[in-house]
Image (cartoon, rainbow, N blue to C red):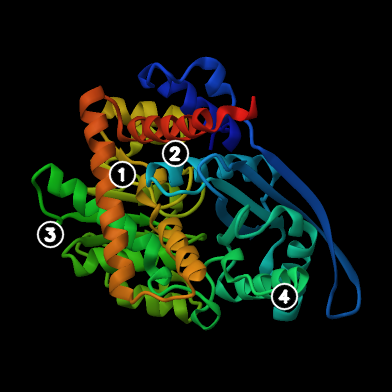
Amino acid sequence: MQPTASLDQNVLAQIARVRPMLSEFLTDELLETIKVPEHVAEASLVIRRDDDSLATYRAYRSRHSTARGPAKGGIRFHPMVSREEAIALSMWMSFKTAVLDLPLGGGKGGIVVDPKSLSRRELERLSRAYVRAFRHDLGPALDVPAPDVNTNGEIMAWMTDEYETLAGQSAPGSFTGKPLSIGGSLGRDRATALGWFIALSRFYERIGETLVGKTAVVQGSGNAGLTMAHLLADAGVRVIGISDSREGIHLESWLDIGTVSKIKAERRRISEYSGVLTTTNDELLEIRADILVPAAVENQIRADNADKIRAGLMVELANGPTTPEADMTLSKKGVTVIPDILANAGGVTVSYFEQVQNAMNFSWTRDEVESRLSDRMIASFDAVYDRSINAGSTLRDAALAIALERIIRAKIDRGFGW
């Protein structure tokens, strides 16, 4: 694997590439205001382990923009969490909420930790310590976190409870992705995958084709990846390859996603699926298919492997899976890419719906949530697709141009406080 630029450098490269297609009102001076976050906080979290020893963990929270509304973005628990990663992901969150035209900005954070090394009680202590450290940087009107890599509804429940304890009042809108019992939203469990599927379906509608009979390869089999794979299979798509963090499997006919889910639930190796070919994660990306789905982590499609991609369409479920250099290669090869800031925005959209329901002290049905999600995803996809056709650009460049113009327009209308 060749070394790749850091995520924050990738974001800046994307912005530079899209500069020529931005509206005239967006000057270079205004564009500079978007390249740095509004606020970045760091902290050392100290907890007592179950064996009575003390352990210290580094933590971060980046708030990129609140020009369009409170910041929104996940908290991840992972050994590779860094300040630069938090900043880059918070920028992508600002772009994502703007592309979906949500009245929100972008935030992101995390803790440098392998959560598998902690007991459930230690995880709760660490989760509460995060809220105590950043309590002045969070809140329903400022920055609303959600689950991300290695975090879930239970962790959001602990964090919500800690925030409310410190605030001395009920504040269900302080976190999203919560359990239904404390203000979570129906539909949040599969929102990211469903939003992705809606964008994919709309793409084929716009080009006059059907999903039935298409083949797909999925890199990553976490909750969103497996849910999405089930949606594909139910729609008549043959999933012929899938992977987890250790390995991939390939079957030329098709994989039964129910069997894959059962193997994963039993914590077995996916290579125990009978009769499959085993691959590495990089080899999996090179399998010939109609649809390639990067659903794992960042920087998976790079300058050194982009030319080996043999899918005609790539739809990003992960955040930042494609480097700017790889984007250029894919474009030259004629590979269409539906970018992360559009394709995986279903999660943040339903998180926004959860905030709205919390503010109303009212709940929508699953059908209402998913209908609203469908409307948002289709309208946003059409806006990006039409901009791409009119500008002769990639879908990523079109999505980013729309996002930057919306964020800067909000800044201009606010007057910058000058």
Assess whether mark 3 and mark 2 are in contact (beta carbons under 8 angstroms): no
- Say which amino acid is labelled 2: Thr
- State which tag comes first along the sequence, 3 or 4: 4
Q: Position of residue 164 (x, y in %)?
A: 70, 72
User: How far apart are the alpha carbons under marks 2 and 3?
Assistant: 27 Å
- Say which amino acid is labelled 1: Met
- Say which amino acid is labelled 3: Val
User: How far apart are the alpha carbons under marks 3 and 4?
Assistant: 44 Å
Disc 4 element: helix
Pointer 4: what residue? 124
Pointer 2: what residue? 322
| Eye-nearest disc, 1 or 4 | 4
Pointer 1: what residue? 314
Disc on res. 228: none
Q: Name the residue rendered at 48%, 47% in the picture.
A: 319
Assess whether mark 3 and mark 1 are in contact (beta carbons under 8 angstroms): no
Q: Name the residue rendered at 79%, 59% in the picture.
A: 133
Pointer 3: what residue? 212
Does 304 appear above or below 96?
above
Disc 2 element: loop
Assess whether mark 2 and mark 1 are in contact (beta carbons under 8 angstroms): yes
Q: For this rendering, which residue is in front, 24 or 416? A: 416
